[in-house]
Image (spheres, rainbow, N blue to C red):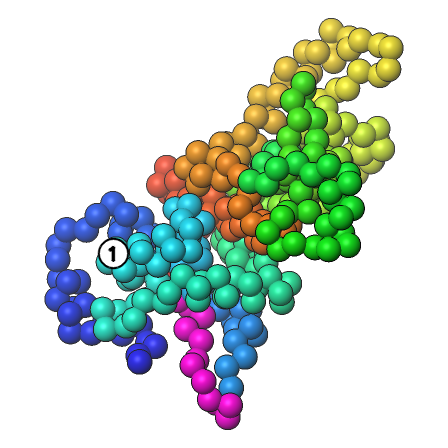
Amino acid sequence: MKTTNQLGFSDELLARRRKSSQMAAKLIKIDKLIDWQPIYQKLSVIDQTSKTKGGRPRKPVSWMVKAVFLQSLFNLSNPQLEDQLIDRLSFQRFVGINLDHDIPDFTTFWRFKEAIIQHGLGDIIFDQITGQLEQRGMMLKRGTVVDATIINSVNRPLKKERRQELSEKPSSQIDTDAHSTKKGKRYYFGYKGHIGVDVGTKLIRKQRFTPAHRNDQKPLDELISYDEMSLWGDKAYYLESYKEASRKDGWFYGVLNKPKKGQKLSKKQKRKNKQYSSVRAQVENPFAWMKTTAGLVAMQAKNIARNAFTFANNCACWNVTRALWILSKHKPFGGLVCR
């Protein structure tokens, strides 16, 4: 079986068509924006195919990386991903599968993702794509907006007794990593996706994934890049120690003021909060995109590692989508030139 990306005779005939779909045009732009080779190299370590032992070889890493990217970009299950690759020529071209290649079955995608997670490489696609966008001058570094969103688990909440039973006799069909939290008057069971967004571009620079009961402030250090000029967030992130440190280091502290116990905010603090909110609101755009366009309304997997991998890839897809929009509206942008 061929594993190269060279076009066959049938592919060349189809390539001569003058018209192409908007989907195909978008995928071509993504392919030009991102250098996939470093990602292939990082993930090639999971390919343990041995020529001496024989057996069926793995599919090319390049196919699998791009297929997994498409899966997150279009909110596809493993069977749906296989189906779309069979049906869509634009998907085949993006992945590098020619007409004389066999399409990988959905279990192949599942095993590939499991291998990534088992090797502790779940953030590689996000880190590599985000790093490339930064190297090409797309991060303004004026400031970072931090926030978290609750993403429900498809599992039902677990009672304390049931959780104890499962700790002794685990079940692969029940998510014991998800936890409950209360927001307003409602309870939620699932996880939190945390992001640090570049002010002005709305690109995600950092991301973390935790159970829903984790305090928003816990991953705060991991959401800051420490080369920005300001920090923004809602009152859940307010910390006097951070405020003092920002003044010392020359940062602007734009986290919403939080009233002290038994006190109300002053008029000045309320006015500042209103001003800060207009900047802080930028973080809502990537979350809205994930939950609508990307369809990330519930975590389907039964453990935190698999769900964290899904969230990281959604963050990567947002960054690519957002970068394309920036380039279309602001050319040239910070000296950025696509390959």
Residue at the outermost top position: 267
Towards the viewer: 9 or 276: 9
Q: Is residue 264 above or below residue 173?
A: above
Residue span colored magenta: 51-63
Kindly tell me whether residue 310 is visible in this rendering: yes
Percent across and percent down for residue 267 are 73, 6
Q: Quadrant of residue 272?
A: top right
Give amino acid for label 1.
Answer: Asp
Apparent side of residue 21 relative to residue 260 in the rendered image (left or right): left
Mark 1: few/some/many CA within 10 Å (<14, 14-19, 20+): few
Kindly tell me whether residue 144 is visible in this rendering: no
Residue at the outermost bottom position: 52
Q: Quadrant of residue 228?
A: top right
Percent across and percent down for residue 165 are 76, 48
Towards the viewer: 155 or 305: 155
Task: Give the residue number, with chain letter if any, for mark 1.
Answer: 87
Percent across and percent down for residue 30 are 37, 53
At 44% across and 41% down in the image, what residue appears?
294
Percent across and percent down for residue 335 are 45, 49
Q: Is residue 53 magenta?
A: yes
Q: Main secondary structure of the magenta part?
A: loop
Label 1: element kind: helix
Q: Is residue 100 above or below residue 80?
A: below
Towards the viewer: 298 or 292: 298
At 49% across and 32% down in the image, what residue appears?
288
At 13% across and 54% down in the image, what residue appears?
18
Q: Is residue 138 magenta?
A: no
Q: Is residue 175 above or below residue 282?
A: below
At 15% across and 74% down in the image, what residue appears?
9
